[in-house]
Amino acid sequence: MRSELRHHHELAAVAARQHGIVSHRQLRELCYSEGAIARAVQAGRLHPVFRGAFAVGYAARSPHRLCMAAIQSCGAGALLSHFTSAWLWGLGAPGPVRPEVTVPTRGHRRAGLVIHHSTILDAEDRAEIEDLPTTSVARTLLDLAGIRRGRHLPGTIDRARRRGLLDIASIDALLVRAGGHRGRGPLLRTIEIYREQVSDRARSELLLLALVKEAGLPRPAINLFVAGHEVDAYWEDERFAIEVDGWENHRTREAFERDPLRIEDLKLAGIDAIRITARRIETKPDEVAARLQHHLARRRAELGR
């Protein structure tokens, strides 16, 4: 009886460190026989979550419990990855219903889990969040770039930037050793705009600078105070300004009333100003660049420059 009580205390201690989850291997190391494990399951003291992983005491499947059960099920070297890692890092992915795990060797199949295999997992690709082994931000973005194309990848990367998690040097180092990973090209192209020294700016401003550079136009000052207002982009020689509109800029009545007044104040100060939506900059950069070129040429003619 004393030995059994000691085993229960040891089991509780292991589970407390692991979000209430214990693996089959750990149970055996705690001297639980196969019969004892079966009896604990039958009595409701252990609840199978995934193959070889059990919830101790109660069966509630919180996201963190699911994640730990996935790791314990897959064994040594396993890392939470892809959408599950993105959720842990706060990059906008939903909480895991079927946790995604990347393992270093093939042959893992687990009902209820999404298993990936990779032979290029280095120490730099590993991290830990709330005691859960997971892929680094750089590796998470690389994995998502392989499956998340179009409009989804840029948004995920920009959320990493806003959270202070976007490390271009770490991504570049990863891309060097990424080999033929299918996310390599999409990730390399998408991070290009963040190489500018103004990478603390909004994504729409970075995209505006990128299209200006591509079109060979003069580079504007960004977030400069002009005529008492901070404008998103300003060409001093042409006395021309751009305000970039996103949906978040117009969610209140105050903003709706204030923004036209800003444009009016600029015009009264002799500064021509236009508004461009962030969506147009993102989806129609060539059209925006052509119109911008026309506006700047018009202003130079008006000012005799």
Image (spheres, grey):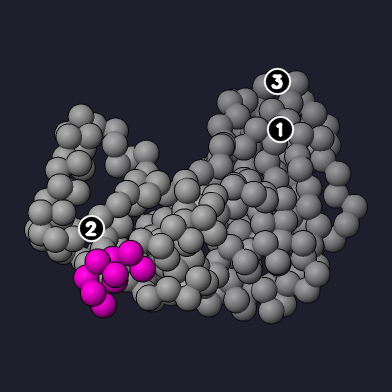
x then y, percent, for residue 21: 62, 40
Q: Amino acid at mark 3?
A: Ala
Pick the quarter of the image with the N terminus: top right
Label 3 to label 2, Cα distance in Å?
77 Å
Q: Residue at x 72, y 77 (%)?
A: 177
Pick the quarter of the image with the C terminus: bottom left
Q: Residue at x 56, y 37 (%)?
A: 94
252 within the magenta span: no
**Within-10-Å neighbours for mark 2: few <14, some 14–19, many 20+:** some
Q: Residue at x 29, y 33 (%)?
A: 251
Nearer mark to the viewer, of 3 and 1? 1
Label 3 to label 1, Cα distance in Å?
16 Å
Q: How many marks?
A: 3
Q: Which residue is mark 1?
A: 49
Of 34 and 258, nearer the camera is 258
Evaluate whether residue 157 shows in this view. no
Nearer mark to the viewer, of 3 and 2? 2
Evaluate whether residue 244 shows in this view. yes
- Relative to 281, is 141 on the left or the right? right
Q: Amino acid at mark 1?
A: Val
Q: Amino acid at mark 2?
A: Asp
Of 180 and 234, nearer the camera is 234
Q: Which residue is mark 2?
A: 272
Of 272 and 5, nearer the camera is 272
